[in-house]
Every structure is written in structure tokens, then in C-alpha cells.
Image (cartoon, grey):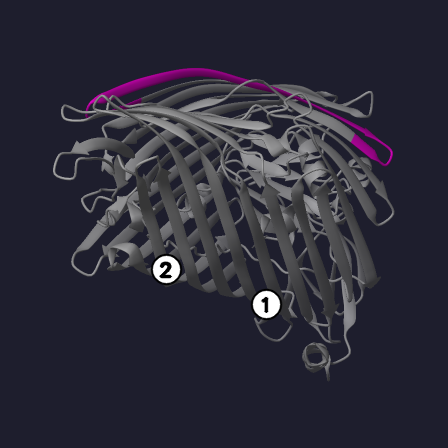
Amino acid sequence: MKRIFTLLLSILAMTSFAQNETKELKARLVDEEKNPVQFANVSLKMADNDSIIAGTSSDENGNFILNVEDGKYILMTSAVGYERLSIYCRPADLGELKMPRTSEMLDAVTIEGSRIEETPLHYVVLPDPTEAESSGRGLNFLNMQQLPGLDVNVAKETITIDGGTPIYQINGKEVSYQRFINVSSDKIKRIEYSNNPGVRYMDRGASGVINIVLKEVEDGGSIVANGKTAFTTGFADGYLMGTYNRGKSEIMLQYNISHRNYDDVPYEMTDKYTSEYRIVERKHSMNFPFYYTTHNIMADYTYRANDSTFLIVSLRDNIENNNWTGSGPMIEIDNGIHDTMNMEMKRKRKINMPTLDLYFSRQMKNNQTIELNLVGQYSMSSYDNKLIYKSDTLIEEYPTYIENHGYSVSGEAMYTKAFDISELQFGIQYQHNFAYNDYVVYDETTSMSKDNIYAYAQYVTMLGEKASLVLGTGAKVFVVNDGLNTLSYVKNLSTLRLNYKINKKMSLSAVASLSPSLPSLSDLSTILQRTDDVSANVGNADLKPYNTLSGRLQFNYNAPKIFYATATAGYGHSFNPIVYTYHYNPELNLFVNSPHNSDYYKTMYFNTKIGAKKLFEFLYISLTGNLRKQESKGIGFHHENLNFYSSVEVQAVWEKFTMGCDFDITPAITLYGENLYHNEMSQDIYVQYKWKDLYVALIWLCPFNKDGFKYQTEGLSEVHSYKHTNWTANNGNMLTLGLTWSINYGKSFKKVQKSLSNGGYDDGMVK
């Protein structure tokens, strides 16, 4: 440990040694009426050549500071909707610099009376000082904003956008979810939010992007410790994060742990397999306890050569150990023959995935930016599943054991050019994934690889003073090799977004997109895995990618005081989607579950959210309703589902206290393929208190549901109909206590921006 500490100090010393003395060049950018010009691009070049030697952006008050050596410079500023500024200067306090507005602008649509601005690409939220102080955590502050499509559950610490998972960023750099939600709200400079991921992130299936931009800070460091545990259940989460910043360097170390040891997890199942030759009916129940521990380790080194050039080196590792064990009685009727037995299930999953992430960013003259990202990831994992049937006369075992080794290498290069009222962006992404799986029980191995190439372009422009356009398109080349055959596909991704400002209170947006979905390596694997005495799983090498065409029309109303509302109508149509269905195989005398391309999947929905914020200066209330119709069709099946989901949320903020509740009123039920998924009915109550650098949270989960979280899945297939229900009873009436303590020392540091995406690994295992 002493050697590591000495090495870190040596690195910091080398990066700060022999630096020339610098001076401050600062100013405040204002318009004709002396209003601040926020987030303007600021660049500095030598007076005798065109080399850009520094760059930054103005803050919410129009201020900026550059630390440079003494000399003669040309300072250039630009912002959409304002005339460009270019002046000759030396390092000094230049005072107020005027940037007159232009008649046309790629500008923000400010919702009067709030601190929310709507730009062509995203919403910009400027913190209300009282909200930032009272909320304590970035998660709480984000919940107060009530942005379109955003659903924040403070008690469960979850965030979704339109029901999906977004990209989480801090200063444009993609970060872990745990690091994101624990940002202190008083450090937030602004939040950039989008419920349209754009053509760049469509390939990853993201539902949106949330970027927290932190306030600029200088030398110094911080240590943050967090822990949360339940009083009566094996539940514990925690993390420890430390940062140290000096000169041009920053070092960040973070460790996360999540532990569960649940012993009360009831499970019930009834199902029926039907064919001309074999009919099997089963009914069983059991307790299915589980145990898991997850470790996440991350180390970042950031080098900021100047305000326009950044280098980040990240090392991460994800280590998981999961165990499930259960037993219970089962009644089985196989072609009229009754049998009663005890079923035991033992399942283990281990994962170790170290990752190296390299990132480089450079801002150049003429409002140009390049970003480069290279990520390498290695995977070691194992999956062990054993199913045992015991009766008076028979013991049957159905084991599965798979060892996986593999790696992925991914990279992205992106170029952006900003003009007066428009912006153009080009990018290319590449990922190579290799997976080797040893199916030990069957004495078989697979070696599969996939190459994923994606090139994209996006254009953003203003259409007059009230409207804007975002247009993006991309081409994807996908190649899969299983050692015997090579499959290749070429697909297009496209998106179109129109924003229109109706008046100071109302805005309208329309989004349309076409995106492909590709089969995974496990979907394509031909290894047949025996599940039990009745069924088996296998992939399908003949699968084809499929396209989804979707559209959304959204209306936003945000009054200067209290009231807000969002109404969204949308439609989606998937052509030949991949679904899993059962069929009877007479040679094996088994019902085999495998993927295939069905006919279509349609969904239509109308979603509305109404509420009030800062009612009586301390109360936040919202009511959400979602009416959705879904339809799926394939060979031998055609299903429809009509569902109305609703929920209510109340939050009160008073001085250092935050109190709230989040209740589901009616359940969300989702149809896909031949399966209906009944989402959990949730009730949460929480109280949080902030005192100086200590944050305390008391959370009560499922206070009115002793069964805890309940999940139910229903199979509609004529070949395999079923009902599965399981309860996480340990969560019922569960009270947890969380503590967060931070120590700041020295001065703060200016964080770096990073926005490129990181690759993932596909293990290709059939389980």
C-alpha cells in the first residue's frame, strides 16, 4: 500500500513539475441588455499564428476564466443566436464583453418562469439554489424537475426514460449508475436531458441521455463514503470514492459493493405442454432463496493538457458471485400418468470482467471537435445449474455447466463542426466480440465472433425563430462467424426530430425513427441445452435482424408558476421481430424453446403526466397515466393486450428535510411475443435529512404489502401455456437506513468532458 501511495504521488509530481507561471484571462459575456450569454464557446489563439492554445465555455452567469502564460492573444467567442466576437488581448480581467443577438439562432426555447431551457438536442436545467440546497443528492434534484418521459424513484434509486434505460454521464463522460445518482446537488452546474437518444445512441438501445455538468473547481480532493442496510433483511449497499487533483492531473478511485441474502422468496408455477403425441401438466411451489455479492472497482486518471485537450485512462473490473437454491413439491401428469416428486434447483453464476478504457478529446479552431475512444474488455464467467427430481422410486438430474472466456474490443471516432445556426456531426463505431464457451456436461464447445461496424451522421439546425430540426442517419454492418458459417447483414438507422415553440408556456415535438435489432450470439447458437424432463432450449442460426419504425408526438406545458403537464402519443411497428416460442420435437420427445422471426409486433400508447411543483413553496405532486395497446402476431399465434397503468408521487421539501411517497395505482402489463409480463406493484415512503456533509435516508419499502415485490409472467402459447408467480417477500415492509458522508480538502478541480460510448461484451451462452 505504501508503494502504491508513493507511486501516485510521483505521478502527480511529474505532471505538475516545471510548469511555467500562468496568469488569468477572464471576462463576462453579455448581450445588449447586459443579460449573461450562457455556455458560449470561448477559444484563445496566439496573435501571430492560428494555433488554438486554450478553450472553455462561459458559465450560467456569462463568466469564464483561462489560465495562460503572459503574451499576446486573440480571444474568440461564439454562441448560437449571438454575433461572434474576436478581440486582441493580454491576460487580464477584460470586464464585460458584449455579444449582440442575431435575427436567426439555433437557440434555446426558454420556458418562462422556470430554469428549464429546451434546445434542439436536449433540455437544459439550471439549478434553483433553494432546490439544490434542500435536495442534497443529484437524484432528488433530478426528480424535482419533472422532465418529459423521466421517471425517478427516489426510494428504489431507479431512473427510466419512457420505460427504458438511459445513458448516464457526468460532464459528458459516461459513468456508472451508482456514481451518477450520488452526485451532490450543490455541485451541479446544469443538467442536460434528452428523451431522444439520437442516431448516435440508437445503436445501443438507449432511451435517452442524462448529463450532469459539474461546477468548475481547482486543486484539491474529496472522499465520499456511503452505506445502506436493512434492519431485518440481508440487504447492504455501499461505496467508497476518493479523488485527488493537482495541476493538470486528476486521480479517481471508486469501489462499490452490493450484497443480498434473501431467504424468503416464494415461487409458484402451473404450466401445460400440449402436442399430438405428448401432453404434460405440472404444478409446483417452492421457496427459492438467493444470495449475491457484486463488486465494482474503478480507477481513472485524467490529464488536461489545456482547456481544449483531454486524455482519460480508466481501469474497471466487475466481479459477481450469484447463488440460488430452492426446493419444493411438484405434481406432474405426463400423458395421464400422475407423479408426485420433490424438485430441487441449484444455480450459480460467476463473472469477472476487467476493462481498459482510453479517451482523447481535442477542440480545434473554427468550432471543430474530435473525440476518440478505445475500449478493451476481457470476460471470464461460469454458469452452473442443476435440477434434481426426487420421488420414492426415481432420482433424475438435469445439470448444465458452462465456462466462458472471451473479449471485446471497441472504438469510436467522432467529429463535430458548429456553424452559426447549425451543427454537423460524423462518427464511426466498431466492435469485435469473441466468445468461447465450453459446455462441459455435453462435451461440446463453441467459438463465435461478431463484428459490428456503425457509421452515422447528424445535422441540427434552426428553422426560423420557433422551430428546429434534428436529422440523423447511419449504416450498420453486422458479421457473425460460428467457425463453420459466416452471416452478414447491412442495415440503416435513421431518426428525425422537429421542435416547435408555440408560446412562452407551450412547446411541441415530433420524433420518428427507424432502427434495426440484431440477434445475439446466444440466439444464433445451435447448442441444445436440456432444461428438465419435458423441455430444452436452443438457438437458431437462420435468424434475421428486424426493423422497428416508431413515432412520437409530445406536447409540453410549463406555466411560470406551479402547474406543468406533458402529453405523449406514440406508435411502434416491428417487422419480423425475434420471439421465443415452443414446438414439439418427436425425435427427442421434448418441447423445444427456440427463437424465430415472427410476423410483427405493434404498440400504440397515450401517456400523460400532470402535476405541480413548489406548491406552497415546498410541495411537489405528480400523477401519471399510460394507456397502451399491444399486438403480436406470428405462425400459430395472434395476441392483443390493452392496459392502463397509473401512479402518483408526492414529495415535500422543507429546509434540510425531504419526505415523499411513490405509489402505483394500477399495474403495468406488457405483451411481447406470446408472453404477458405483470410488473410489480410498488409502494415506497422515504425521509431524508442533510446536515453539513452528512446525508441520512430512511426508506420504507412495501409498507402495505407483506408479500413484498410480486412478479407474474403468463404464457399464452397453445403449445406451452403457463403462469409463474414469485414474491421477493424479504422486501415486504422493509425498513432501510442509508448514510453518506463526504470530506472535501484543498480546492476543487475542473472535471473533463467525455461523451463517447463504451463497448459491451456478449458471452453467447445458451442457458
In the image, what residue occupies the spot 52% across and 41% down? Answer: 166
- Residue 543 vertical placement versus 672 (above, below): below
Disc nearer the start of the sequence (2/1):
1
In the image, what residue occupies the spot 44% across and 47% down? Answer: 347
Corner quadrant of residue 239: bottom right
Name which residue type carries label 2: Asn
Q: Residues within 10 Å of mark 1 (few under 14, many from 20)?
A: many
Name the outermost residue toward the front. Answer: 392
Name the outermost residue toward the bottom. Answer: 18
Q: Is residue 663 visible?
A: yes
Quadrant for the N terminus, please: bottom right
- Residue 457 vertical placement versus 535 (above, below): below
Residue that numbered label 2 is attached to: 404
Give left or right: position of 362 versus 432: right
In the image, what residue occupies the spot 63% across and 39% down? Answer: 124
Secondary structure beneath disc 2? strand
Secondary structure beneath disc 1? strand
Q: Is residue 74 visible?
A: no
Residue that numbered label 1 is attached to: 309
Q: Main secondary structure of the magenta part?
A: strand
- Residue 257 vertical placement versus 510 (above, below): below
| Residue 172 or residue 163, whichever sits in front | 163
Give left or right: position of 752 versus 712: right
Place of residue 649 in the rendered image (x, y in percent of width and height, measured from the top left): 67, 23
Give left or right: position of 150 versus 757: right
The magenta stretch is: 632-658
